[in-house]
Amino acid sequence: MTIRPDMVGRTIEPLYKTYSWKDVVLYALGVGAGYADLDYCYEKDLKVLPSFAITFLYALMRRSLAETRADPTGILHGEQELCFHDVLPAEGTLTTKGRIARLYDKGENKGALLVVESDTFQNNGKKLFSARTTLFSRLDGGFGGDPPPSGAITMPDRKPDFSIDARPPENQPLLYRLSGDDYPLHADPAFARAAGFDSPIMHGLCTFGYACRAMMERLVPGKPQNVRRIACRFSKPLYPGCPLQTCIWKTEPGRALWRVINTDSGEVVIDNGMFEYGEPPRRDIRFDDRVAVVTGAGAGLGRVYALELARRGARVVVNDLGGARDGSGEGSRSAADQVVEEIRRMGAQAVASYDNVATEAGGRQIVQTALDHFGRIDILINNAGILRDKSFIKMHPENWQAVLDVHLNGAYHVTRPAFAVMKEKGYGRIVVTTSAAGLYGNFGQTNYSAAKMALVGLMNTLKLEGAKYGIRINAVAPMAASRLTRDVLPVEWFDKLKPEFVAPIVLFLCSEQCPASGNIYNAGLGCFSRAAVVTSPGVRIGDGEALPVPEAVMDVWDQLNDLKHGKVYTRLDEQLTDLLQMNAAPSADAGEPSRNPQRPATIFDGLADRFLPEKAAGIDVVLQFTLSGETGGQWHVIIQNQRLTIKHGRHAEPTTELKMAADDFTALADGSLSAMQAFNSGKLALSGDLMKIQLMETLFKKG
Ligand code: NAI
């Protein structure tokens, strides 16, 4: 019987497993828990050990071994990785969807590695965890496949921060196997001898469970929900009854390396251990079932965006040409490949694209890669970039053109085919990468600044074209250490400016929850701000009939430049309307556009008459209004069971809070200002569930 490499890529049909609190407790007892950690062993307020996730993978492992026809007598656990998206419930039915991802050949008589990737979901579709399971088939080497990547981790050369000792009892495997791994190697002495061992050995995953408990005890005591990722490699068998020690090194906040040692022999039995932990994401921003394309994702910021999107459930196309900083050279596939490998190792899905964004064919091919592999595209981050800095006179056409080709034309080439797919599907999130150099100017970067600011222009119009198809597009101006900024940013800041500080806002802009479109955000070092084109109220010279003279412009220069009370327009016609209104005004003053004189109190009083209960089915919301200005005040609007209640003052727990000027509120109420315009132009500040602002427009007739 020979192993079947043609099975790589094969999807295993979904596997279902129903479990109760007894299975959770049985597992905990199987990995050495007891009275000392009663939370995991007693059904009252039962907590679930994250490593319990393993028990949902045994059926998948058996199916994968059967599909590939691996020799069953030579199977050992090779590596295990678990990434947690949510906490495991104490009972329920979970569905595991897996596929045979890789088959590596270690050589004749050295064995083969079978890699199985999977996602496990709750009944409501919520993804709970992803796994990457590597099985070592000792008798299947030499089939002519690729050798495995080394992937070895260097452990710190210092004493561990924590060493936790344990001694699993001799009958531990007999208890552990009741959780699903009934492979005879761990119970049957004759089978164990035939497989070359003195007696039955511990399940590697049982030792893994001991290690997981040890790390939880030291790093996230009592908080299984804070375990984000556990990974390791099984290096030596362990006999039951042998003492073991879990050694843990904290390497950075939220991350530790670990290994398990047999303290009798000194042998390392589990190596390459990684443990990531931290508070679960506060608001549930997920990208399950979403497909993202990130250009220039082989390094720097793009790599971090791709990893973060994948960590939160997206399937990602990692595009990178792999060229030099200035865009010269042939390009190398390794940049994209490495990031794809990183994503796969965390149990998520990714595919590499080596295409050049600077050509139309390249752009088309990048989007096609997403469609070919994942069948859709929901998110596009235009991030690829190069630099060719020169002062303006030395800015020869080839340097000008090369930078425009990658940044501006690159975004055009990829966005156009992506936009077509998004438009058809009625959903899309696009991010373009602008720069402080474009927004504010930077010596020696005329080409780059022009390209970066042109992207803002592209965004300004595309946001209008995409709006009715659910497509939102925003721009980010990052500030981060990377190959591009190595000699641009101050040395003393370089190490601190991690790209990870930029990723949060980019991910939010890519999320369903993002309410904005057409906005520009600065991000760096955990500081975020909005940048916008502000238009001063301006001044009219003369009566709009007689042509003004330049001297008259000089006379009103200060007033013309005064940005106080400036406006952020969201489309050309808004600005045109203001221009025409200013022209029609009787005096030469650049007054505010006329406002609805109705007071907010009157509007709230009349809101009940405009309420459309038939549109409020299933809506349960409290909108808190805080209106500034002379006629302002606080009101809250409760919509529940298709009934409307309006009260003066504050509500204790509003769903959404809206703060704005009383005048803008009246404009919102009479329909002359949309909630989205108000938000985008900074007139409306929101907190809580941002999506609920749209109810103002759907649940009330226009006043
Ligand atoms: P980086 O050099 O680390 O990453 C850019 C990636 O784009 C590279 O991996 C490169 O191979 C890839 N790339 C270049 N040309 C390509 C092409 N034609 N097709 C496909 N891939 C290509 O640089 P970093 O800093 O991560 O830059 C990412 C983006 O952020 C760029 O658009 C950059 O202009 C922008 N940016 C970065 C700032 C920073 O502080 N790092 C500041 C402002 C903007």
Image (cartoon, rainbow, N blue to C red):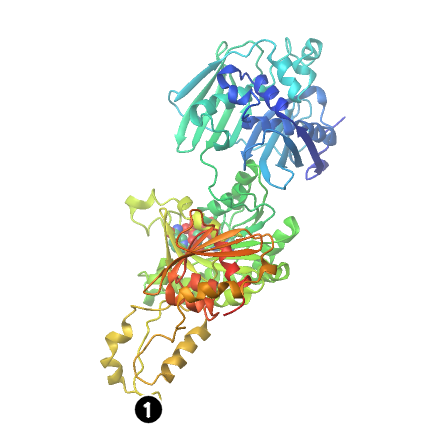
Considering every residue shown, the one lying at the far left of the view is: 555
- Visible residue check, residue 104: no
Question: Is 343 in front, or is 460?
Answer: 460
Crowd class of label 1 (few under 14; some 14 to 19; many from 20; radius 10 Å): few
- Residue 195: image x %, image y %? 68, 14
- Residue 180: image x %, image y %? 67, 22
| 541 left or right, relative to 361 | left
Which residue is disc 1 drawn over?
Answer: 546
Q: Residue 61 appears in which quarter of the rendering?
A: top right
| 85 left or right, relative to 603 | right
Q: Quadrant of the N terminus?
A: top right
Question: Is 691 in front, or is 614?
Answer: 614
Considering every residue shown, the one lying at the far right of the view is: 1
Residue drawn at (60%, 13%) of the image: 172
Residue drawn at (47%, 63%) of the image: 675
User: Looking at the image, is 583 positioned above or below residue 625?
Assistant: below
Q: Amino acid at mark 1?
A: Ala
Question: Is 31 in front, or is 631?
Answer: 631
User: Looking at the image, is 453 positioned above or below residue 231?
Assistant: below
- Residue 560: image x %, image y %? 28, 75
Question: Is 190 in front, or is 657?
Answer: 657
Disc 1 element = loop
User: Looking at the image, is 474 positioned above or below residue 339?
Assistant: below
| 226 left or right, relative to 194 | left
User: Looking at the image, is 610 positioned above or below residue 160?
Assistant: below
